[in-house]
Image: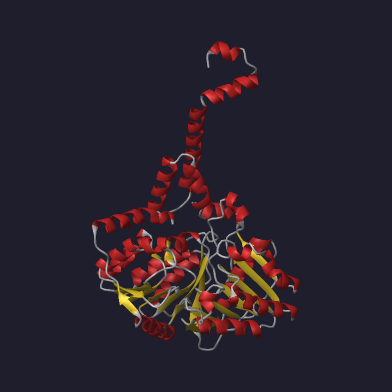
Amino acid sequence: MPLQGLLQLSPEQTLFSALAYDGPMWLYSLGWLISLMTLVHLFYTRRPAQSLIIWVLVILLLPLAGPLLYLLFGSRKVFARRAKPQLSYAERQPEAPSHPLQVQLQRVLLANGIPPASGGHRIESSFSPGQARSWLMQAVEQARESILLESYIFEPDETGRLLLEKLTEKAHQGVAVYLLLDTVGSFSAWRRPGLFRALRAAGGRVAFFQPPASLWQSRFNLRNHRKIYLFDQQLLLSGGINLAGEYLNPERDDHWVDLTFRSQGPMVDQYLETFLQDWHYTTGERLQLPSRSQAVAGGELAQAVPSGPDTEQDNLRETLLLAIHRAEHCIELVTPYFIPDHPLLEALLTACKRGVRVRLLTPEQTDHWLSSMARLPGMRELREAGAEIRLYRPTMLHAKLVLIDHQFVLMGSANLDYRSLLINHEIVSYCYGATLCRHLHRQIGALHEETRSWQPPTGRLQQMWENVFRVLTPLL
């Protein structure tokens, strides 16, 4: 607008006229200013180099949309620390290490503030949805003091509603019932508030982790993927199972195969402390539930290892890398989603070169098309390095397990992908000892009877798509 025209306008008219005249340039400058501020925060966080580079490109190439995507999905530990306190645990005296790998892992975990392993655990494992259902329903029925359930998914299907009925009945009997669910994973339950009316009326408590309001607090991306099912503060069920029919109803044609373990012993206290802190963060309520766990004579050596935004370090990723580098004979990997970051994949490739037998068991078809595509680049490299890759054919395999040298096993809620290793709230158990490991090895062997060998698909177009997903996986 000419200067003469501007002088004849009021101050308010002058401002709006200038913005209208230079609007695109003003918007462009604002977009770059927001991008620069976002980059400052990005460089302040600690994350893998590949993820850092991808986010820099997204923020710079999309001046307004890039920072918004980062705000919603790029948050990791820094944003979380402002809202959710770091997990803390009661001090425990470490026992003398009886396993070579335990010595190394314990040094790292103690430095990260994770309680040491202890003996005295009775641990049972099963890949059967029928057995998992039996264990869960039996534990609910036999509970006399408390039932604490923390899950990523709760579905209001036949299995979920049956469980709700049993929980409501226990609440009427005076048992303290607490149900902590992730909002995204349990969205179908979250949008049905009347679903839990009877349980709440009976005295039960239900809470949802990171509700939609957290979208604007840069915490919506940080999901609670933990599976903690505690009864009377002394019996634990955990593994990969969620509270839904595909995990717990063997009569369904589309039921999944998952790993569930049942445990008694000192490790139960660590799961209890984790649940209590997650509940306090979600509701603001501090529950006073004392430990009731007891060591079992001659039991297994084990410990709980949490990881996620509420831990200072990436406990799971650090110790998994260490365990793979220390492997001498064999590494068994069972996971529904194989999308490792670069250091983890390099560790597995190096293990192959060292002569370690590496075997990956994963489903033929996953429940997510994107995951099925994103896993191909890592699987190709692993297969070309000499690893054996088997695809489980009958149904979706949702089990998560790493078995090393038949002496150490990692099992719990975590997948071998970016989200579990670097973003989500997770918890797993580390168990040391030949007895449990031999049992799990036999169970894995039974699964292998219904698999086929995987060979990398050929074709230039195929490899081009794999390279695209190799670039995008840090954002998944």
Q: Quadrant of residue 294?
A: bottom right
Report the side of 382 relative to 138 (left or right): left
Report the side of 264 relative to 374 (left or right): right
Res. 120 in view:
no
Report x, y in % for residue 322: 38, 67
Q: Quadrant of residue 91?
A: bottom right
Report x, y in % for residue 396: 43, 73
Q: Nearer the viewer, residue 448 or 187?
A: 187
Report the side of 338 relative to 207 (left or right): left
Check the image and report above or below for 95 versus 346: below
Furthest toward the bottom, the residue is 297
Res. 455 in view:
yes
Q: Residue at x 53, y 50 (%)?
A: 72
Furthest toward the top, the residue is 4
Q: Nearer the viewer, residue 24 or 253?
A: 253
Check the image and report above or below for 128 versus 76: below
Report the side of 388 relative to 335 (left or right): left
Check the image and report above or below for 307 versus 392: above
